[in-house]
Each structure stands twice: as C-alpha cells, then as structure tokens.
C-alpha cells in the first residue's frame, strides 16, 4: 500500500481523484467557523445540525455521489477529542463502513488540523483495518486499498510522525506475515531466509546452524531443538546507524516456530495457535524492517534463537539436566517451558556485544494472559530508566505494557537439588518466576523482558497476529536514538570472558 501525505483543505480533499473519502471530524470542529462553504463541510454541518450523526467517537454517516465532491463514496466519522486512540477508533469504524461495496483502491483520509500523533494513529489504523493474510490461500484476495492520501493542514508539521508510522506499518506487517504463516511455511530455516532478505539494506545478517551452536556451548537451545527434524537456526542481525564505539541495544526474539509442549504435551484444543509462538522473533524481524526505512542514529543487534519444540524420540525429557552457554546447569522439569531455555542462551550470547540495554520479547507464559489479558504486554525490567522508557514508548505508540515485579523472593521457587536452577517453579506467579529465570543470565546489563503471550495474536473469528510489540519497539529505539544524540556516548564495556571463551 502506498501512503501519501498532502496539505489539503476540505475543499481540496473533496476534489481529489479517489474511490472514497473519509472525513474525520473532531468535537472541536463543531464550534469552528460556520462560514466555510465548501460542499463537504456544508454537508457535514447539516448532518450534525439534523442530529444524523451522534457525538460518540466512531459514529459515522455515509453518502454516495455527493454534489461537489469528486470521490463517489464519503464517510463522515466522529473522532471525539482527536487523540491518537480516538482517531484510530474512528478510522477503523470508517473503513468498516466502506466494506461490502465496490472495492476502494484509492482513498483520501482527511484529517485537517489534527496533531501529529493522530496522523500516525490514522496511518496505523488504515493499515490494520485493511490487512489481509494471503500467503497460503489458493486464490488469494489481497487488500483492495492501493493508495491512501492523508490530508492534513500542514504536511511539514506532520511529516516526521507520518514517516515513522509508515515504517512501523511496514515492520508490523512483516511481523504479522511471519507469525500468521503455518508452521510448515515458517520453519527455522524459513525465518533465517527472511532475515537474510534484510541484508544489504543497512543490516548485516549471520545465521548459525546446529554445529556452530553446539561449538559455542548453547546446551539449552540444543536441548529444546533435539526432538525435531527441523534444524535449529540462531540468527544474528546488526543494524549500524552509529559509530562502532557506541554500545548497541540488543533485541532478542523467541523463535519457537511450533510448540507442541514436547514430552510435556499440550492439549489438542487450539494447539494450532502454537504457530504464533515465534511472535517474538517475528517482532524482531519487523523492527529491523522498520529500522531499514527509518535509519536512526543508533546501533541495534537482533538475536533470534529459532527451533521447534517436538516430542520426538530424541526429545529432551522432564528431569533432564543441561548446561547453558553461561555454564549454569538447568533441570528441565517441564519441557513446555522451553521458551526460557532458548532465550537464556541468547541472553548470554548478547553480552559479547557489550550492550547499552537488552530487551527480550517472547510469548512466554499463559500466566501473563491471566494477569493482564489481551490489552497490555507484561514488562519486567532490572533497570528503572529502561522500564520507564519502554512504558513511555508503549503509551506513545498505543502498544501499552505494564510493569511487573522482580522481587528476589520469587526466585526461590526455581531452586532444585539436581542443578543450579529449575526451568519452572509452581503455578503461583508463573509469569514472574519465568522472568526471574531469565534474569539469572543477564548480568549487570540493563535488561527488560516483554511477555507478549496475551497481545501477540487474537483467537476466535478474528484469529491472527497483531504485529505487537513492533510499534513499541520502534518508538523506543527512535527515542533512544534521540537520547543518545543528546547525551555523552555510552562506551562499550570491556568484554568479560564467559564459559564459551568469548
């Protein structure tokens, strides 16, 4: 889809060549100068005066072949206070109103004097409402929308927010695509190929296979992968937007391309949704897609440990003890707690980059869904400044998270007599004990963990990936680039020798 930003008055918007026009109307416009005489505004004011359009955000009124308006279909939609949340709600309602008729290929979205955050929200709203998954359909019906012209009062003032939103859309749709693909169309090898497709766009890519991972000593990742015929992949992406001397942010995405639970087999009902268990990996790929468009002055490393969790004859068994890359031994009491196993080796590997911050993203626990539902992602952080930066980014990007505790006492549940740590505790505070397990492999680096089990996809009739938390991550990285530009550089720390000799 081609997004375009233009300075347009209501009269100019009504003169555009398009199949449909969405006229977004904030409450503040009710009291604006009634002397405006263009056909679109006169029609809108008359509808309001007649009581044909309620004040609630998302309420809409449609017309066809309105005199003086070139697009054949018009939707007038309320957006309340004009906030990003209300504008996105309004855009979704308006796109819904356009469903069912002749295809709309060219759309004008008239926002007028709404602020820059609302412009970004509108772009994201159009993309979300028009997205279609088509890869494995025999007769795909792609989205009808081809060109969306966003009309604003001043395109220069909205340009930066608009471009960030368009790049976020590109990244979010990469994340949706790979999370939505069935597991036989999104194996670890396929994910590696997708990552290699980013190479040459300001991004370097390295892919490690089973032999390289074994040589490194990633025993936890190898243990999860050993029950599958699909070979594991460990993907390393590097975006260099700043001098090499500037410490990078490291993003780690859980890449379980299908999760049966292993020997601790999951129930059959809805197991198909475990193709979404690599949504963390998909979000890292999507974030790097956005970085390729935006080119912020920041260094970013992406790490994706990718494998299947299968109950084959060679699968790891409950009670097995493995040695992680950090040298710590782990008793695997439940093979369905596999995400933390592949992440712990990636967290240790991340230390070789001497990062300024490490953020892992994972569909890690059902307990997070119980705690927070499907609205906010769970956030755990060892550093208050990092936590606040992610919370702020989530609110600004309409991709919110909520900080959860990391008290040392929660780690007591992971004690075992047979290894340094068990991979699960009891049922109590399962989302927290999973984070406490990961924290053991972080060291002193500022670290955050995003549990996206409740936000990465939707079930039911709207089943599909959401592309979260790509908007949060992109906004955080852009904010981090600004902070880095205005602060003394964070030098790379001296590399400490680990058990693998790095």
Image (cartoon, helix red, strand yellow):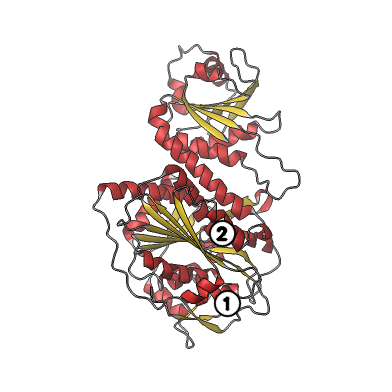
Where on the picture, by quarter, is residue 157? top left
Residue 11 is labelled as none
Q: Is residue 15 left or right of residue 29?
A: right
Quick check: can you spot residue 300? yes
**Earlier sequence position, callout 1 versus callout 2:** 2
Image quadrant where one finds the C terminus? bottom left
Residue shown at 63% from the left, 78% from the top: 315
Q: Residue furthest front?
A: 200
Q: Residue furthest left?
A: 488
Residue shown at 40% from the left, 50% from the top: 476
Of circles 1 and 2, which is in front?
2
Residue shown at 59% from the left, 20% from the top: 17
Residue 334 is labelled as 1
Q: Residue furthest bottom?
A: 417
- Rendered location of residue 94, percent (x, y): 59, 32
Q: Nearer the viewer, residue 457 or 317?
A: 317
Quick check: can you spot residue 466? no
Q: Nearer the viewer, residue 87 or 14?
A: 14
Mark 1 lies on a secondary structure that is: loop
Image height of 164 relative to 106, above or below: below
Q: Is residue 137 left or right of residue 475?
A: right
- Rendered location of residue 396, percent (x, y): 41, 44
Q: Residues within 10 Å of mark 1 (few under 14, many from 20)?
A: many
Mark 2 lies on a secondary structure that is: helix
The residue to which callout 2 is attached is 192
């Amino acid at each position: 889809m081609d997004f375009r930003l233009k300075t347009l008055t209501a009269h100019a918007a009504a003169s555009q060549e398009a199949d449909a026009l969405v006229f977004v109307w904030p409450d503040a416009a009710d009291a604006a100068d009634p002397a405006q005489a263009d056909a679109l505004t006169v029609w809108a004011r008359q509808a309001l005066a007649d009581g044909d359009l309620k004040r609630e955000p998302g309420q809409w009124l449609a017309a066809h072949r309105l005199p003086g308006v070139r697009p054949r279909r018009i939707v007038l939609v309320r957006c309340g206070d004009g906030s990003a949340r209300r504008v996105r709600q309004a855009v979704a309602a308006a796109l819904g109103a356009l469903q069912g008729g002749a295809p709309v290929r060219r759309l004008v979205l008239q926002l007028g004097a709404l602020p820059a955050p609302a412009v970004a929200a509108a772009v994201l709203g159009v993309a979300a409402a028009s997205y279609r998954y088509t890869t494995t359909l025999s007769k795909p019906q792609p989205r009808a929308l081809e060109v969306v012209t966003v009309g604003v009062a001043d395109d220069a003032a909205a340009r930066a927010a608009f471009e960030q939103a368009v790049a976020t859309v590109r990244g979010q749709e990469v994340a949706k695509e790979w999370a939505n693909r069935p597991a036989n169309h999104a194996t670890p090898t396929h994910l590696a190929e997708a990552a290699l497709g980013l190479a040459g766009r300001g991004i370097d890519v390295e892919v490690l296979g089973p032999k390289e991972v074994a040589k490194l000593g990633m025993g936890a990742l190898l243990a999860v992968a050993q029950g599958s015929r699909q070979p594991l992949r460990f993907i390393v992406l590097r975006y260099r937007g700043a001098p090499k001397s500037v410490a990078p942010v490291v993003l780690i995405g859980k890449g379980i391309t299908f999760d049966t639970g292993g020997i601790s087999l999951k129930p059959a009902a809805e197991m198909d949704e475990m193709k979404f268990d690599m949504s963390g990996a998909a979000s890292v790929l999507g974030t790097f897609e956005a970085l390729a468009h935006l080119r912020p002055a920041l260094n970013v490393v992406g790490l994706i440990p990718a494998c299947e969790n299968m109950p084959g004859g060679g699968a790891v068994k409950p009670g097995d003890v493995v040695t992680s890359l950090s040298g710590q031994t782990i008793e695997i009491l439940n093979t369905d707690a596999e995400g933390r196993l592949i992440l712990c080796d990636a967290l240790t590997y991340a230390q070789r980059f001497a990062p300024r911050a490490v953020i892992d993203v994972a569909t890690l626990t059902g307990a997070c869904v119980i705690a927070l539902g499907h609205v906010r992602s769970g956030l755990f952080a060892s550093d208050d400044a990092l936590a606040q930066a992610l919370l702020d980014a989530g609110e600004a990007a309409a991709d919110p998270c909520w900080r959860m505790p990391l008290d040392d006492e929660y780690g007591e549940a992971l004690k075992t007599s047979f290894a340094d740590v068990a991979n699960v505790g009891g049922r109590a505070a399962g989302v927290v004990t999973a984070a406490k397990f990961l924290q053991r492999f972080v060291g002193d680096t500022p670290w955050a963990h995003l549990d996206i089990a409740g936000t990465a996809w939707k079930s039911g009739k709207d089943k599909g990936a959401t592309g979260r938390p790509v908007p949060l991550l992109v906004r955080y990285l852009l904010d981090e680039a600004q902070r880095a530009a205005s602060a003394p550089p964070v030098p790379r720390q001296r590399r400490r020798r680990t058990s693998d000799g790095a």
